Image (cartoon, grey):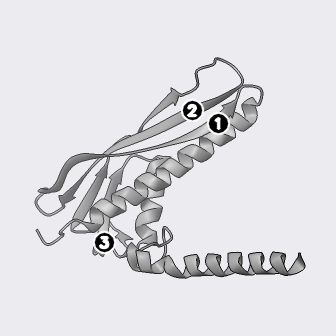
Amino acid sequence: MKRRTFLTRSLSVALLGAGIAALPGCGFHLRDTGASQDVGIDSLALAATPSALGDSVGRALRDAGIELSDAAALRLNLGTERIQEIDLSAGGSGTREIELQLEVPFSVQRTGDDAYLLDQQRVAVATTFRANDNELLTQDDDRERALESLRRDAAQRLLDRLRNLDASR
């Protein structure tokens, strides 16, 4: 019996190791790591009203190696975020599943002639979280964590859009 347990565990560990070794070959990478952060833009002016989303976008741009400067050749115009909360649960009490949707308009302009490289577009992200009506304090904390996650995801999507932008136009 001990030998069978040893063989089963050894086989499980070997398969897990093979799976982990295969991940880089399939294109898998962890978010915010490695060369995937290279956007191809050296500096950018960020035009946004002071907000948590503006802070997240600014942090993501700096983390990607983009200098934020008012004298930059390109300007990212970031609109006001719109947050929608949808109750996905059928019942009226107890634990509810809530979907949060965040949408923000943005555009990219050349600062020299105000020509749009990206006309107004929208980034939309969504997530769900569970809320228990009996634990109102933790419900607010869960909502705030979900919003922080949405803002980071929206900032990452903006970086992806900038990555596809041809700054030489």
Residue 98's disc is 2
User: Mark 3 or mark 1, which has the lower sequence index?
Assistant: 3
Tell me the distance, in whole angstroms, between the alpha carbons under discs 2 and 1.
6 Å
Dot 3 amino acid type: Ser
Residue 130's disc is 1
User: Which residue is depicted at the point 28% across and 51% down?
Assistant: 77
Q: Quadrant of residue 142?
A: top right
Query: On screen, 18 above or below 161?
Result: below
> CB under 8 Å between callouts 2 and 1?
yes
The image position of residue 144, as x and y in percent, is 61, 42
Question: In the current view of this chain or complex, which residue is farthest to the top?
Answer: 92
The image position of residue 106, as x and y in percent, is 28, 49
Residue 43's disc is 3
Tell me the distance, in whole angstroms, between the alpha carbons under discs 3 and 2.
38 Å
Dot 2 amino acid type: Ile
Element type at mark 1 = strand
Query: On screen, 149 above or below 156?
Result: above
